[in-house]
Image (cartoon, rainbow, N blue to C red):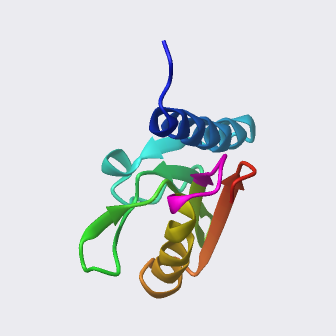
Amino acid sequence: MRITQGGESNHNGSWLEQCVVNEARSRGIPVRDYCDEADNRDWINPAVLIRRVPYRSPYGLWATGEFVLQFYERRIRIECRNQEISGSVDEKFPYLFMAARDHMPEHEVLFLLHGNGA
């Protein structure tokens, strides 16, 4: 069965996200979904990687990012993008930067880019 370009991109994006999850777990950082976390602080373990954390997009709609690392008093948003070949996804990078700069509530944002197309 042949995988479409979009299907391959989704698979590679999931792979990159899984790398983040694996790295957090290897360091003893628990991984939780936002709906489970609900922005609660865990005073026993002051570090947690939260998946699918919402924010208001530049269009005023709710959008969801990949992760927020709550590390003691720091909140670091982590956005993952995979781009194996150049193309329309390149147009999303300026939008992502603008969203991070102007709309994501975290003061620190980390972009993880994978692939030779970016």
What residue occupies the far left of the structure in this picture? 61
Residue drawn at x 24%, y 72% as measured from the top left: 61
Residue drawn at x 61%, y 40% as measured from the top left: 21
Is residue 102 something one can see in this rendering? yes
**Quarter of the view holding residue 53:** bottom left
Considering only vertical position in the picture, is 109 above or below 35? below
Residue 89 image offset from top left, x and y in percent: 52, 59
Q: Quadrant of the C terminus?
A: bottom right
The stretch drawn in magenta includes residue 48: no
Residue drawn at x 72%, y 41% as measured from the top left: 23
In this view, the residue in front, 17 or 118, is 118
In this view, the residue in front, 103 or 30, is 103
Considering only vertical position in the picture, is 93 above or below 66? below
Residue 93 image offset from top left, x and y in percent: 56, 70
Considering only vertical position in the picture, is 72 above or below 46? below
In this view, the residue in front, 96 or 64, is 96
Residue drawn at x 50%, y 61% as measured from the top left: 88
Residue 103 image offset from top left, x and y in percent: 41, 82
Residue 97 image offset from top left, x and y in percent: 55, 78
Is residue 47 something one can see in this rendering? no
- Magenta highlight range: 81-88
In this view, the residue in front, 29 or 97, is 97
